Structure formats: structure tokens, C-alpha cells
Image (cartoon, rainbow, N blue to C red):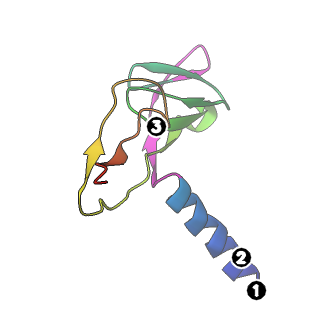
């Protein structure tokens, strides 16, 4: 039963947020990770704009774990809207559907 619960929690997290990726051998300056021109204090999770991710610094391992915007399909009559504003998740693309009343 425990393996199923863990799998369900991971699946829900991927659907809610998106896939994550690990960047290794990041530059460490004064105990903080330098990730894509952003400074992340060790052990802290920070929502970013460029790239549009939520990232956590692991300075002792020289790693940053980043969660991407979620993947989604676009319904018929709808389109993807990209916004240049805000940090994750506000900067993530969204589905926009035209009203046909």
C-alpha cells in the first residue's frame, strides 16, 4: 500500500506543477547557488521569472532542483497565452478560450 501512496503523491505533484529537473555543478558564491543568472540562498526555494520555474538550492551538493510549468493540452477553439510578467507560476503559459455566445 505504501508504494501506491507515494506514486499517487508524485503523480499529483507533476500534474499540479510540472516536471522537475536537476542542474548539477552549479556555481556557488558565498554559500548561494548561481542558477540562470539568479542567486538562490542555500536550502531556500524561490519562484523565478527567467526561467519561469520554482528552484531550490543545495549548495553543499552544488545542485539546483527546478520545477517547470505544468504541461497541458489545448482544447479546440482555445490557444496558449504566454505572459512576460510575474514569477512562477504567474509567468507560466495558460489556455485562453474565446467566448462564442
When asked about the image quadrant of residue 35, the answer is top left
Q: Quadrant of the C terminus?
A: bottom left
Decide if residue 63 is in sight here.
no
The residue nearer to you, when weighing 26 against 90, is: 90
Residue 34 image point, x, y percent: 47, 22
Q: Which residue is drawn at 43% across and 26% down?
A: 49
Residue 53 got which mark?
A: 3
Residue 10 image point, x, y percent: 60, 65
When asked about the image quadrant of residue 43, the answer is top right
Question: Which residue position is annotated with label 1?
Answer: 1
Q: Residue furthest top?
A: 30
Vertical comparison of 74 with 97: above or below: below
Please say if the residues under marks 2 and 1 sit with CB atoms less than 8 Å apart.
yes
Q: Which residue is drawn at 45% across and 41% down?
A: 24
Q: Is residue 22 found inside the magenta-colored segment of the image?
A: yes
Q: Residues within 10 Å of mark 1 (few under 14, many from 20)?
A: few
Residue 21 image point, x, y percent: 44, 49
Q: Residue at x 47, y 53 (%)?
A: 18
Residue 27 got which mark?
A: none
The mark that comes first in sequence, 3 or 1, is: 1
Amino acid at each position: 500500500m505504501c508504494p501506491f501512496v507515494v506514486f499517487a503523491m508524485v503523480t499529483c505533484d507533476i500534474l499540479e506543477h510540472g516536471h522537475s529537473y536537476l542542474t548539477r555543478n552549479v556555481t556557488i558564491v558565498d554559500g548561494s547557488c548561481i542558477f540562470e543568472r539568479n542567486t538562490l540562498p542555500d536550502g531556500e526555494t524561490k519562484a523565478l521569472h527567467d526561467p519561469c520555474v520554482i528552484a531550490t538550492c543545495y549548495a553543499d551538493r552544488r545542485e539546483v532542483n527546478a520545477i517547470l510549468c505544468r504541461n497541458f493540452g489545448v482544447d479546440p477553439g482555445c490557444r496558449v497565452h504566454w505572459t512576460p510578467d510575474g514569477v512562477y507560476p504567474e509567468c507560466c503559459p495558460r489556455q485562453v478560450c474565446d467566448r462564442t455566445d
